[in-house]
Image: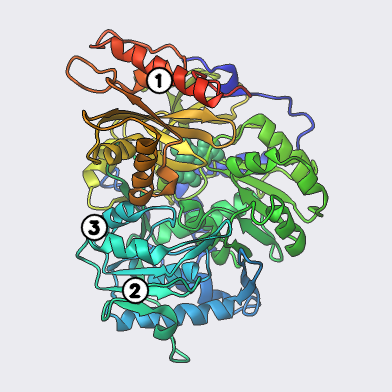
Amino acid sequence: MKPSQEDKAALPVDEVYHTALETYFDVHRKSLENPEEFWNEHANIVEWYRKWDTVLDSSNPPFYRWFKNGRINLSYNCLDRNIKNHRRNKAAYIWIGEDGSEKIVTYHGLLKRVNSLASALKNLGIKKGDRIIIYLPMIIEAPVAMLAAARIGATFSFVFGGYGAGALSERINDSGAKLVITADGSYRGGKIVELKKVVDEALQSTSSVENTIVVKRTDSPVEMVEGRDMWYHELIRGGNVFVEPESMDSNDPLFILYTSGTTGKPKGVVHSNGGYAVWVANTLKWAFDPKEDDRWWCAADIGWVTGHSYIVFAPLLLGLTSILYEGSIVYPAPDRMWEIIDHYGINLLYTSPTAIRTLMKYGDAYTKNHDLSSLRVLGSVGEPINPSAWQWYYRNIGGGKCPIIDTYWQTETGGFVISPSAGLGLPPLKPGSGTFPMPGIDPVILDRNGKEVKPGEKGYFVIRKPWPGMFLTLHNDPERFRSTYFEKYNGGYYAGDYAIRDEDGYFWLLGRADEVLNVSGHRLGTIEIENALVSSSEIAEAAVFGRPDPVRGEVIVAFVVIKDGFSTDQEMGNRIKKRIRDSLGPIYVPQEIHFVRNLPKTRSGKIMRRVVKAVALNQLPGDISTLENSVSVDEVKDAIDTFSRETGTEGRKGAVPE
Ligand code: PRX
């Protein structure tokens, strides 16, 4: 496999920020040569009730267990530990509402809030090991809920507010959650999203939930079910409480976070307490080199793994001050992000390529009126960053003086995997490359037979050795954990991504190698969307794929076969979109829906999604010897051509040129 020009996108780097590199290489080498010694030392970034007996137990691969028999509590580490020192009255969070309101919550104040909620949870009968669902917007109660769960040893599962009732109930059922913490609504782009209504609908198809706790945020009208639903503010009244943090085994679960895979069923990624904490705290320190007085803004949503690891756990473990911004970065105007940086003097900014491309589209007029000189380090996450967005970020936002920390990682990895390390020594940066592995990461790029590819050749990204932040298992499905990730490449961890390592040893992560889409940095399974489509009574068959998009990375395109007797007009398209929005959530709504009478299939009746995609994007469809009905290919072509005529778009267009 050869990389295309867009894949590799190497640019001259002479002028781009770098510092002495020796320390990085030295630390990375030591981490692989003697992992026991290395992690024995670096695990002390957090405080343990009891130190481990064994750094790494590899007796039952791939179920690796880090810091065996160590005991720890992350709420203690994030809060109690910090209020004993100079950070007691330091801001843990500066919360900024979309409406401009502001709340500063100190470490001491955060501990108070967490204790109040932890006590309320205990009074409701929530115990160590119980699962609770958090379905909250970007408000201070979101980290409070996560930390309260961690404090009493309950396993939380955060469900992103952009998911609909179907997605929520599926997660409640899979996790067997006893409790849901939600809000009446949330503000987004000046509008209210009514979250409690979604919860009410989801609870109609679940049976495990005994109570819901509702935060009042928008004052939207909500129905409170007597005996089941409680207001957060009423529950936490009761003055000064202290809840003793539960002593957790290093390998007890901290949270389950559902993410999309190649089947219709989302995967419940389970993270540990000990290894996870060691990993997120060290990686943030190595990659971004935060200083005590810095203001850190990770602009992701708290409901994604980026928010879990780098809005909540890592910055609190390091005692930093974080920005927590509630709303849209283009509301009320496209300079919202720059205004916040200017006003609060942000030093470290971590955001996504989609956000950068969105803001870049508005041009420099919006950046010019703001003083961005407080910025020292910039970060990127979620998708490959294209060189022109990189350059704009580097020059227009960072003023050519801030390194860009392009962090490649996944829900499963817990924290950064490939990233430049500002805290250890930066290589000359190449726009679009995450550069080198984090300490402890031993990556390799393999062809489909498991043979290492040559420099510059595209292959599959695999991590050969376990690392502390790796997930423990998939909830309720250890076999899927083993077979999806560890079976293909000699027991190594297969990430599901394509990558290249260039002649200088730099890694370039190129996107998914499986049936998973990346829309604005959101990971969505094609099959989940197809399943939701065919579950509606009018649709017989569906094929979904991603079309490259200059701003969002990819957009969702659906081809559907409508059953006889139903219309195939715009109204039907709108009806289908609404149904997807209500069930899976707004992030899953296809941008384009095309109606056809047949879809390309194999002789055994399997829909050939890859052929639909290739034809629609005007690419070579590859091997079509098993294709049964060639007329279907013409139908796909006609549908796209008609669509582009009607909408004035470019139609069957392939990769977006850089
Ligand atoms: O394809 C890779 C892409 O995002 C996927 C992981 O998605 P998720 O588990 O939702 O976590 C996102 C936030 C960590 C990966 O398999 N990805 C993430 N970061 C990058 C990236 N692709 C290229 N470069 C990145 N920096």
| Vertical relation: 116 (above or below) 12 | below
**Among the two numbered marks 1 and 3 on one chain, the one whose residue lies closer to the N terminus:** 3
**Among the two numbered marks 2 and 3 on one chain, the one whose residue lies closer to the N terminus:** 3
Kind of residue sitting beneath label 2: Glu
**Among the two numbered marks 2 and 1 on one chain, the one whose residue lies closer to the N terminus:** 2
Say which quadrant the C terminus sits in.
top right
| Vertical relation: 175 (above or below) 458 | below
User: Quick one: label 3, few (<14), some, or many (20+) residues within 10 Å?
Assistant: some
Residue 200, horizontal then vertical, whole percent: 31, 65
- Residue 34 at least partly seen: no
Residue 518, horizontal then vertical, whole percent: 46, 37
Mark 3 — residue?
173
Residue 495, horizontal then vertical, whole percent: 40, 36
Front in this rendered view, residue 483 or 604: 604
| Vertical relation: 495 (above or below) 374 | above
Q: Is mark 3 within 8 Å of ligand 1?
A: no
Mark 2 — residue?
223
Determine the secondary structure under disc 1: helix
Determine the secondary structure under disc 2: loop
What label sits on residue 639 in the rendered view? Answer: 1
Kind of residue sitting beneath label 3: Asn
Residue at far bottom of view: 239
Front in this rendered view, residue 610 or 636: 636
Q: Is residue 158 left or right of residue 567?
A: right
The residue positioned 22% from the left and 30% from the top of the image is 563
Determine the secondary structure under disc 3: helix
| Vertical relation: 194 (above or below) 263 | below
User: Quick one: label 2, few (<14), some, or many (20+) residues within 10 Å?
Assistant: few
Choose mark 2 or mark 3, whichever is in front.
2
